[in-house]
Amino acid sequence: MIEYSIGVDLGGTHIKFVAAKSNGEELARAHDTTDDDGDAAESWRQKIKSQIENWTQEFGAPQSVGLSAPGLASRDERSISFMPGRLQGLENFDWTKQLGVSVRVLNDAHAALLGEVWQGAARQKSDVFMLTLGTGVGGAILSGGKLLRGAIGRAGHLGHISLNSNGAKDIVNTPGSLEDAIGDCTVSQRSGGRFSSTRDLVEAHQKGDADATKIWFESVKNLAAAIAGLINVLDPQAVVLGGGIAQSGDALFHPLREYLSEWEWRPGGHTVEILPAQLGDFAGALGAAFYSRNEHV
């Protein structure tokens, strides 16, 4: 009998699945569409149930099942207790009760960090935080080997720290947030309508467009200021950057490290590593599998 865990990452557009042993060896991967439209909840619930059943038939019953999704996980870790606006039917849906197997539920950014800690960029690290740079900016914190959850699950929402008290309010009413400073959601606004995506902005910068360079460097400068402040608060060994914007490579990491060389507090010359995430779209599924079998995290 194979001893393994199943991790599920439920997103607004796709569902990722992984079956993995405790040493990280993967037995299988799968993905499907979420179809988050109208009364689609029954569709993605059934897809998740069917995939778990398929692997149970193929490999035997899993030792544990973990599921990550956007929103705040409930205290009993059986559901997402708060996720307005997306994935209708997700809030307070008890996965253990409905699927007939024990399911441990966590936030998707928390899961992505745990995936990177288990099998990615942050292996063997006990103090690290992650920023996921995409349409918005998500985050997660591992401190002393423990995932920081907070009182109601809000911990790690690093995209909603304030960089400018006079700035516009973001989606959680934070003024001048990091998310609005670099997230894809505001690139059109930040560029006066010239660019509809960060990818287009970065490509123009790389081609020598002076205005694009100015806009991009201002975005990276804000990210560096946020990271420098978070380093002072959390004292990590490393910072992991994931998400689509982090795939900009040297266009992001070179100016970011230059700004940090000026602003990061480095007692005794100690420098915090700035690392690109390694696991891509399956980080959350891997992190969910890891979390399901590790009660101490």
Image (cartoon, helix red, strand yellow):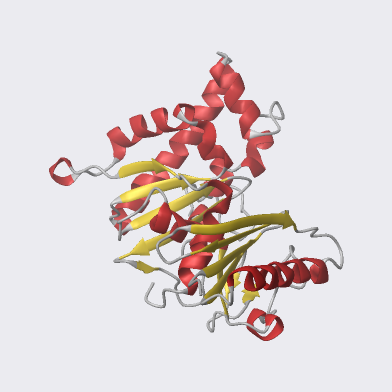
Name the residue: 44% across, 52% down.
Answer: 130
Q: Is residue 192 left or right of residue 125?
A: right
Measured as percent of width and height from the top left, residue 109 is found at 53, 59
Q: Is residue 80 left or right of residue 143?
A: right
Q: Quadrant of the C terminus?
A: bottom left
Q: Is residue 266 above or below residue 250?
A: below
Q: Nearer the viewer, residue 195 or 19?
A: 19
**Which residue in the rendered view is the most extreme toward the left?**
268
Task: Return the residue found at the far top.
Answer: 208
Q: How many marks?
A: 0
- When the figure is inspected, residue 215 is found, relative to residue 106, above or below; the finding is above
Counting from the top left corner in percent of width and height, residue 152 is at: 51, 76
Which percent across, then down, holds residue 19? Answer: 56, 63
Taking the image as drawn, is residue 176 in sight?
no
Location of residue 12 by image quarter:
bottom right
Residue 209 place in picture, x, y as percent: 58, 15
Inspect this view and state whether residue 1 appears: yes
Q: Is residue 276 above or below residue 209?
A: below
Left or right side of 262 for 93: right
The reply, left or right, for residue 12 in relation to residue 180 is right
Residue at (46%, 77%) from the top-left corner?
Answer: 151
Return the residue nearer the eye: 274 or 259: 274
Q: Is residue 206 above or below residue 168?
A: above
Q: Quadrant of residue 253?
A: top left
Residue at 69% in and 67% down: 51
Q: Quick one: which residue is furthest to the front in this view?
A: 1
